[in-house]
Image (cartoon, helix red, strand yellow):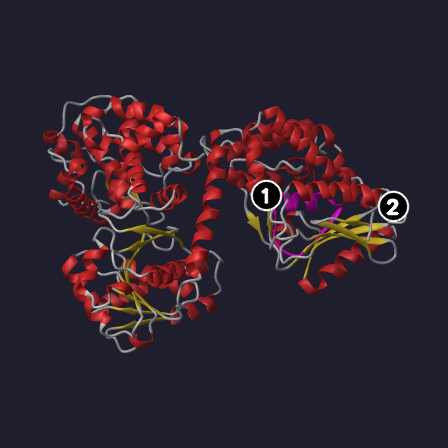
Amino acid sequence: MIYEGKAVTVKSLEDGIVELNFDLEGESVNKFNRQTVEELGAAAEAMKADSSIKGMIVTSAKSVFIVGADITEFGALFTLSEEEIAGWCIKSNQAFNAIEDLPFPTVTAMNGIALGGGLEMCLATDFRVMSTEAQCGLPEVKLGLYPGFGGTVRMPRVIGVDNAVEWIAAGGQHKPEKALKDGVVDAVVAPEKLRDAALSLVKDCIAGKIDYKAKRQEKLDPLRLPPMENMMAFQTCSAMVMQQAGRNYPAPMAAVQTMQQHAGMTRDKALEVEAKGFAKVATTPVASSLIGLFMNDQILKKVASKWEKQAKPVNLAAVLGAGIMGGGIAFQSASKGTPIIMKDINEPALELGMSEATKLLAKRVDRKKMQPAKMGQVLSSIRPTLNYGDFQGVDIVVEAVVENVKIKQSVLADVEKNVKDGTILASNTSTISITKLAEALEKPENFVGMHFFNPVHMMPLVEVIRGEKSSEEAVATTVAYAKKMGKTPVVVNDCPGFLVNRVLFPYFGGFGMMLRDGADFQKIDKVMERFGWPMGPAYLMDVVGIDTGVHAAEVMAEGFPDRMKHDYKDASEVMFENKRFGQKNGIGFYKYETDKKGKPKKVVDEATYELIKPHVGASKDFEDQEIIDRLMIPMCLELVRCLEENIVSSVPDADMALIMGIGFPPFRGGALKYIDSIGVKAFVELCDKYKDLGGLYEPTAKLREMAANGESFYQ
């Protein structure tokens, strides 16, 4: 053994060839933590000192190659100064440079996923051979960062400016075909041939059949582009990246600017530029938020895994109600491998549900994300029916009928009589109390809420709602089923609106009060979209459905009258009374026309102003920040209340639910992270500034205590 560590080993093979193998002790995957980086450098030194070595292949002992840097470890570094972070980058890069500078040819055998630092390791070797089952990419921009282990330096020198910008600024994860086409890898082979292919390639280099030194030199030299072409390439790329990334995500543009800045430099000078730029983006609030979201997501996955251990298997599911929602649930279940029965009381409804599932599958086929044969297989695993004939074999039933207490209770009581003992019943209600619905059941312990968000196939969140009598097994099984469907489940306790809708409606309440006070709904929409929301509140109401929103607002007002009941006519109520329900009937706050792609396009409707005029104050131009404060404070405070009341169990659950359920701006990290970014003390002072507006703006006693003690939600 030439070198033996706890993450990296180097052993001799044959004919002077050695194998550098990654196998991080105690972990299911390889990742770059401090230990791995240090051992890589030490291994390189040991090989450099051994004159008998003629070539090297790099392998992984795990099913993945390297998943990237250990963000749980390195994330703490980003609280340091820019100078300290840049210094860490330079020091870490010495290990990768040492591999690149070895006095013999090097080939990486990429057996599985190679992301971030994993792909940067591959780029440090002379050649890369990839398994047909592997994937690779540089996803750092999704954490508000860009590659810091030489990725911005080596990638453009290996594959050219245009391709490098795409790989780095978009942060995608790519299949072997794409990697080979763009030149990131030199060959793609079947998994069983990977090792032999790497050995063959390094032997050809040793034999002089391939000039590996010339290949390596391209990575050490400045970019080989005339200055004018170089400038034009980066200008074109910059415009494209700016348009796609937007101003709220600085890392993609910073990556392009860094690559342009060091394009004319040799490797070591270029790495210094990369390190300084990396340090700058690593210390931005956006990076802090996005890294926080990554950590929160890991926490949610661990929690879901714990629930799965208590779950009963779900081999066959059913959905009651075959509308758009029921069809979406059926599609999601079947496409992820769980056959599902779709029941309704009439044939046209079943046809609508099957049509919805077929449409979603056809889109996947059109986009080359699914083979036609697979589409047929998925469709055949959705069984439409008008009776309970096959329900004895069902493990879980999702009720998705009309949002009416009596109808839901009747349907649930009916289905309970037609399923086997122990079948879990779940309601997709968005507002009705799970405890209330359970009153109609003989075994309420088998009943939970399973709230999907529309459209089902796109929205990642599922709220699993625990009623007063819901058993742990029922919750666990529903969590496991949601996860199996490709969703992220968050368990919450029962209350009006549960978690997401309960928090959303105070935001709408703040919007309603602003219109009452003379604000322009169009300006509010524009301000909140600039803040980072995918759509402003008026547009969002139209998309959700104003009739749905008015009904939900009534439920919320009844549940929390001290702050959610109002003594004025809300603009949404005016829309409802005038049968302006939003996109569903083509008119709400805005009018909707069909664009060239057949999608609804909103246009201004002056009649909206005339309709609400009798119910609002004189027109007033509010400052952007006041609009933001008056809408965000009620939402943030309601989430704080949900946390304090144990409606949601943790800070990560709370923030992730809003991001995945209603599109809270990810770069802000969540509502509780947003409070932290302002400072709890400053946030409480901001609430007090608007105390005359009522209970929606009143901080809790515990939040005031946190402010006084200098505490935050994320310690």
Q: Residue 424 location, x and y as percent?
A: 31, 66
Q: Residue 396 location, x and y as percent?
A: 33, 67
Q: Residue at x 41, y 58 (%)?
A: 307
Kind of residue sitting beneath label 1: Asp
Q: Is residue 127 magenta?
A: yes
Residue 657 in sight: yes
Q: Residue 419 location, x and y as percent?
A: 27, 74
Q: Is residue 308 magenta?
A: no
Residue 683 quadrant: top left
Does dot 2 land on a helix, a strand or a loop?
loop
- Establish if 247 lies above or below 113: above
Left or right side of 40 for 553: left
First in sequence, mark 1 or 2: give its number. 2
Residue 160 quadrant: top right
Q: Residue at x 67, y 47 (%)?
A: 183
Residue 264 in sight: no
Kind of residue sitting beneath label 2: Asp
Q: Which residues are magenta?
A: 111-129
Q: Residues within 10 Å of mark 2 (few under 14, many from 20)?
A: few
What residue is disc 1 on? 70
Q: How far apart, in angstroms, are the residues tagged by discs 1 and 2?
A: 31 Å
What residue is disc 2 on? 50
Q: Residues within 10 Å of mark 1 (few under 14, many from 20)?
A: some
Left or right side of 245 for 617: left
Q: Residue at x 19, y 68 (%)?
A: 413
Does dot 1 land on a helix, a strand or a loop?
loop
Front one among 530 and 306: 306
- Establish if 337 lies above or below 289: below
Front one among 134 and 164: 134
